[in-house]
Each structure stands twice: as C-alpha cells, then as structure tokens.
Amino acid sequence: MAITVHPSAIVDDGAQIGDGSRVWHFSHICGGARIGERCSFGQNVFVGNDVKIGNNVKVQNNVSIYDAVRIEDDVFCGPSMVFTNVYNPRAAIARKDEYRKTVVRKGATLGANSTIVCGVTIGEFAFVGAGAVINKDVPAYALMVGVPARQVGWMSEFGEQLELPLEGDAEARCVHSGARYVLRGKHLQNERVA
C-alpha cells in the first residue's frame, strides 16, 4: 500500500511514513519523524523531527505534535488538541535542551481542544475529554475532564463509560463488547490481562 500526500502538504526528506498512511492539506511532516502504517493526518497538522508515532493513529485538523512526543498505536488526537514540550517557555530564553518527553499509550483518546502539558504519560485506552488540561500522568482506562483535568470515571476499550467507582475492588462489563474489567485499588485492567 502506498502513502497518500496531498499536493499542498510538505513531507521533508528523511521522514519515515508507513504504508497506507495519509497526509492531508497544508500539513508538514519534518524529516526526523517516524510514523507507522495506516495513520491519518488531517488539514494543517505539524509533526516535528523527534516524534515517533505508531500504527493506525488518527490526528485531526490543526494539531501540532512537537519534539519529544511519543504516540503508540491506535491513538485518536481530536481537532485542535495541543501538545507542549517546554514546561516554562519564554521567547527570549532558549530551552530546547529542556524538552520533556510526553508518552501517549495505545488506544488513548485526546478530545478536541484538550491540552497535554509536557512530561506526562497518558495510559492505555485513557479518554481525555474535550477542552481538558492534562498536567499529570493519567492511569490506563481513566476518563479525565476539566481544567486542570481530574478523573471522573473509567472507559472501556470500546470507548464507553464503565459503571465503576474511582477506586476499590469492583468489576464491570462493557455494554457493547461484553469485555470484563477488573478494578483493584486505583488500577483497572481488561480481564484478558488481569
């Protein structure tokens, strides 16, 4: 499978883009970027040099993925969501040697207009609501909303909220997939990995 690059997009020499990926209008992929298969980059997306992106990642319009960001497989980046890479930026002070690594684990969703402050890890299948500001690590399967974001629930891999307390010992099933989830303390797992 070939990659699709719109004529208005710029893909710098050296960029690695996997089969079946698509780069749409006015997007820019820098030469050091490493991108997996079957990814989609909407209009006006920027991908920096020191960025690694897994397979089947969907990046909607107006998203910039700056250096030091790592995105695993099956992640959804909603329209106009924001990554940062410097914690305390100043225009007059160069801080490129202070970039903080941000990791987005497999299957996570980052809602429209959410902001991910650099230096955090977002757990597998976590769900960040629209407009939320993430400034600390997010547990796997957590549902995060608000400014600053706080956990208000748990999400299934299917993308449905589970009827579970925030902590304790409990179990729930996803109403759509039937998958069983087990909560122990503050950690949720799908039963296939429990």
Image (tube, rainbow, N blue to C red):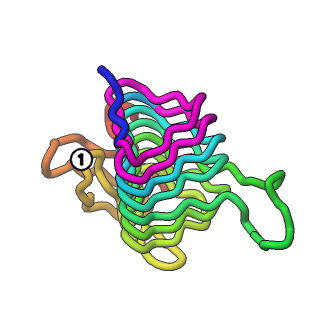
Q: Residue furthest top?
A: 1
Q: Which residues are magenta?
A: 7-35
Residue at x 40%, y 35% (from the top left corner)? 194
Percent position of residue 48, x then y? 60, 46
For badge 1, the amino acid type reads Phe
Out of 168 and 158, give the one closest to the viewer. 158
Name above or below for residue 3 compared with residue 161: above
Q: Is residue 156 magenta?
A: no
Q: Is residue 169 visible?
A: no
93 left or right, relative to 156 = right
Q: Position of residue 105 (x, y in %)?
A: 49, 43
Q: Confirm whether residue 175 shows in the render.
A: yes
Nearer-the-camera pick, 136 or 186: 136
Q: Main secondary structure of the magenta part?
A: loop
The residue drawn where x is 32% and y is 28% is 20
- In the depicted view, which residue is nearer to us: 114 or 169? 114
Q: Residue at x 49, y 56 (%)?
A: 186
Q: Quadrant of residue 166?
A: bottom left
Q: Which residue is mark 1?
A: 158
Image quarter of residue 169 = bottom left
Q: Nearer the viewer, residue 100 or 3?
A: 3
Q: Single out the residue that lies furthest toward the bottom.
A: 147
Q: Position of residue 1 (x, y in %)?
A: 29, 20
- In the image, taking residue 172 as reference, residue 91 lies left or right, namely right
Q: Position of residue 191 (x, y in %)?
A: 32, 36
Q: Is residue 137 left or right of residue 53?
A: right
Quadrant in the picture for residue 107: top left
Q: How many marks?
A: 1
Residue 19 in the magenta stretch? The answer is yes
Q: Residue at x 46, y 29 (%)?
A: 17
In the picture as drawn, the residue positioned furthest to the front comes out as 7
